[in-house]
Each structure stands twice: as C-alpha cells, then as structure tokens.
Image (cartoon, rainbow, N blue to C red):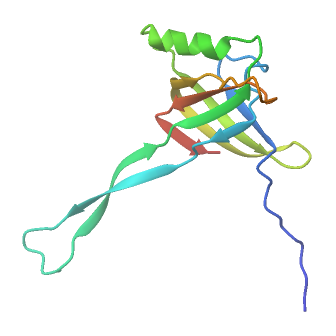
Amino acid sequence: MATGDRVDPYPGYNFRIEITGASAGVTAFREATGLMFTIDPVEYREGNSRDLHVKKLFGLRKYANIALKRGFTQNKELWAWYRNVVNGVADRRNGAIVLLDEEHNDVLRWKFYEGWICKWEGAAMNATASEVAVESIEICVEKVELD
C-alpha cells in the first residue's frame, strides 16, 4: 500500500483577529464564530415552459454576524466603537479572521467589509465562580471574502 504525504486539517485554536483602527490589545479574542454565508434561491417559471418544475436563480447573498468573545481588560476600544454606533456615528470598519498553522503562519484569511458592532454583551457576574469576565460582541458585516 502506497503512502504519501499526510495533510492534516488546521486546528481551530490558532487564529488572529484584525480590525481596522484597533490596537493589538483589543483584538486578542478567545473565540470567533459566525463564518456562515448563504445565498437565497429565487424560483421562477416561464409562462411557456413545458417543464413541471421551477428554475432557480442566485438571489441575495447573506453574511451572518461575526461573534467575538474576549476577557475584560482595561482597554475600552470595543465599547467606544459600540458607543459611536449607538450615537449615530457611521463607524464601519474592515477586518479579518486569520487562521494560523502550528508555526503561527497565516494560512487562511476571511476578510470582512463595512462591519459595525450591532450587539455588545457584558460579563455574567457570579460571586461563587472563578471564571474570567468575558465581553461578547457581534459585528454586522456586509461582505466576507476568503483570501
């Protein structure tokens, strides 16, 4: 039986988040989810078609919100970005979720465009637990591309 070079999938724990205008301290997240994209089908049937089924065309492309979680620190950049949006400032930013290999080299990059924080969630406080206080945000994005 012939053997070749083994190609293992990349682990999901080596990643980096990049956000335009944010410092390195604010982009250190423990979790990133929401890389989900869909295209709505548009069904139609021509009036003179003899087919007994609908035709399907590409419809609107939709990109899920990107959810990020990190431990609370003294850095308030995410809160400031969210407050800008709450106060009506069109603070849209580009960024990326970058998957790294075992040597911390970039291997895949999902670039997002025109993002803004649409949800901010503070930590759950519990005096009987010894967990890290975590803040969560969701970034509403208009488009994502795999680079």
Asked whether the viewer can see residue 89, the reply is no
Q: Quadrant of the N terminus?
A: bottom right
The answer to whether 17 appears left or right of 35 in the picture is: right
The furthest residue to the bottom? 1
* 22 to 132, vertically: above or below: above
**21 shown above or below 1:** above
- In the rendered image, the residue lying farthest to the front is 128
Q: Name above or below for residue 44 compared with residue 135.
A: below
Q: Position of residue 89 (x, y in %)?
A: 46, 9
Residue at x 71%, y 25% (from the top left corner): 126
- The part of the image, by quadrant, that contains residue 16 is top right
Residue 21 vs residue 124, the one in the foreground: 124
On screen, residue 56 versus residue 101, left or right, reads left
Measured as percent of width and height from the top left, residue 93 is found at 56, 22
**Total labels drawn:** 0
Q: Quadrant of residue 58?
A: bottom left
Q: Position of residue 42 (x, y in %)?
A: 27, 57
In the rendered image, the vertical position of residue 6 relative to residue 107, given as above or below: below
* Image quarter (top left, top right, bottom left or bottom right) of the C terminus: top right
Residue displayed at 45% across by 7% down: 87
**Would residue 145 be visible to someone looking at this image?**
yes
Q: Looking at the rendering, which quadrant does residue 144 occupy?
A: top right
| Residue at screen point 25% across, 69% down | 55
- In the rendered image, residue 71, in percent from the top left (x then y), is placed at 75, 25
